[in-house]
Image (tube, rainbow, N blue to C red):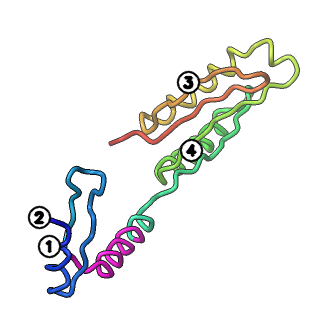
């Protein structure tokens, strides 16, 4: 129908003529109460913002000479972070002669990952970047 006729119908009912897709040929319009539509739209946006979760990246630092008990403590902390839905960045900073044996740090990282018991997924495998060895973990989907 013509836009004038649609506007006349909307005026008779005391409503507004709202263009849904103005770029279409012919343009698509809808007869509705525009203020009520805007109010409902803002309520939906607020609800979506409230339900949004922000994923943080937590960091756990290990060392190449870490002991079994210390690894258990770090593993427990890592599991807490993962259960909260956060990503975890596990890092080892190599000092002095440790740079020559970076493979030992990678082994420590792999042992740490195995200790998590499948509750994490490796986003980034252990890799040497300068003096650091970095691995990124995210929660496994159950």
Which comes before the other along the chain, label 1 or label 4? 1
For label 1, the residue is 5
SS of the residue under disc 1: helix
Residue at image position (36%, 75%) is 43
For label 3, the residue is 125
Q: Tell me the tag on residue 78.
A: 4
Q: Which of marks 3 and 1 is in front?
A: 1
Residue at image position (72%, 22%) is 129
Residue 137, position as x, y percentages in the image: 53, 36
Residue 74, position as x, y percentages in the image: 62, 42
Task: Report crowding for label 4: few under 14, some 14 to 19, many 20 or more residues within 10 A (C-alpha).
Answer: many
Asked if disc 2 and disc 1 are in contact, CB closer than 8 Å, the reply is yes
Residue 87, position as x, y percentages in the image: 54, 43
Residue 43, placed above or below residue 83? below
Q: How far apart are marks 2 and 3 (CA)?
A: 61 Å
Q: How far apart are marks 4 and 3 (CA)?
A: 16 Å
Frontmost residue, 128 versus 83: 128
Which comes before the other along the chain, label 4 or label 2? 2
Q: Distance between the residues labelled 2 and 1?
A: 7 Å
Identify the residue at the far left of this view: 1
Task: Report crowding for label 3: few under 14, some 14 to 19, many 20 or more residues within 10 A (C-alpha).
Answer: some
């Amino acid at each position: 129908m013509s836009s004038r006729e649609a506007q006349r119908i909307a005026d008779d009912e005391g409503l507004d003529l709202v263009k849904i897709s103005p770029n279409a040929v012919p343009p698509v319009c809808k007869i509705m109460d525009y203020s009520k539509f805007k109010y409902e739209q803002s309520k939906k946006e607020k609800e979506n913002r409230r339900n949004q979760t922000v994923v943080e990246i937590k960091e756990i630092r290990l060392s190449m000479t870490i002991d079994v008990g210390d690894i258990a403590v770090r593993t427990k902390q890592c599991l807490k972070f993962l259960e909260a839905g956060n990503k975890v960045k596990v890092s080892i900073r190599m000092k002095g002669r440790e740079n020559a044996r970076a493979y030992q740090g990678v082994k420590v990282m792999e042992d740490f990952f195995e200790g998590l018991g499948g509750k994490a997924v490796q986003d980034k495998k252990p890799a040497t970047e300068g003096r650091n060895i970095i691995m990124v973990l995210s929660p496994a989907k159950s």
